Amino acid sequence: METSDVLSIIAIGISLISIIWNAISYFKFDKPLKQMDIETKRIEIAKHKKEEEDKKKAIIKGEFLYQGEGKYYHFSVINEGKCVAKNVVIHLPKEHIDAVSPIGKIDILPSNQPIIYRVSPTYKCKNIVMVEFQWDDDYEEKQHSIEPIVVPHVVQRVFD
């Protein structure tokens, strides 16, 4: 056996060890890292789609306010979304709330700008009333939500 044969055998052995080591490191380290990278990119894409969707949505919320030492009730409507709400319609339960200020259709409700109406609870008013909102936005037309809203300082009347 000559020196060149020994060196060839050693070179082949080192190559085989290198191939085995690369295969082990791929399956142990590289493949899981690539899968994590793919999953991270999927999450980023989903997050980006959600953000783009949220930019097109309006979120209408309402709140009853008790002001003037028990003299005045107000109903505040606000758009908490990032998009302008259009054609907003508010349905207050008439058996529980009387609108002192007329509540009509709101053509445009900008983001984070409240509109306040004067209201008065009726004698049948409960602490929580269900208020219905309908609106259009850039995401979808005829959005709809029914929200339970607390009416502060309403005295529950008990009738026999």
Image (tube, helix red, strand yellow):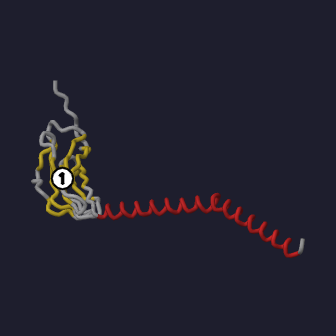
- Give left or right: position of 13 versus 98: right
**Between 21 and 100, which is closer to the camera in this rendering?**
21
Q: Position of residue 72 (x, y in %)?
A: 18, 50
The quadrant holding residue 53 is: bottom left
Find numbered disc 1 in the image and state the secondary structure of the residue it sits on: strand
Residue at the bottom extreme of this rendering: 4
> In the rendered image of this protein, does residue 70 appear above or below residue 106?
above
At x 27% / y 60%, what residue is drawn? 57
At x 22% / y 37%, what residue is drawn? 155
Q: Position of residue 46 (x, y in %)?
A: 40, 60
Give the amino acid type for the residue marked by disc 1 in the picture: Gln
- Quadrant housing the N terminus: bottom right
- Give left or right: position of 6 versus 89: right
Q: Which residue is mark 1?
A: 134
Q: Within 10 Å of the Cα at label 1, are there few (<14), some (14-19), or many (20+) other Cα atoms? A: some
**Between 115 and 31, which is closer to the camera in this rendering?**
31
The quadrant holding residue 6 is: bottom right
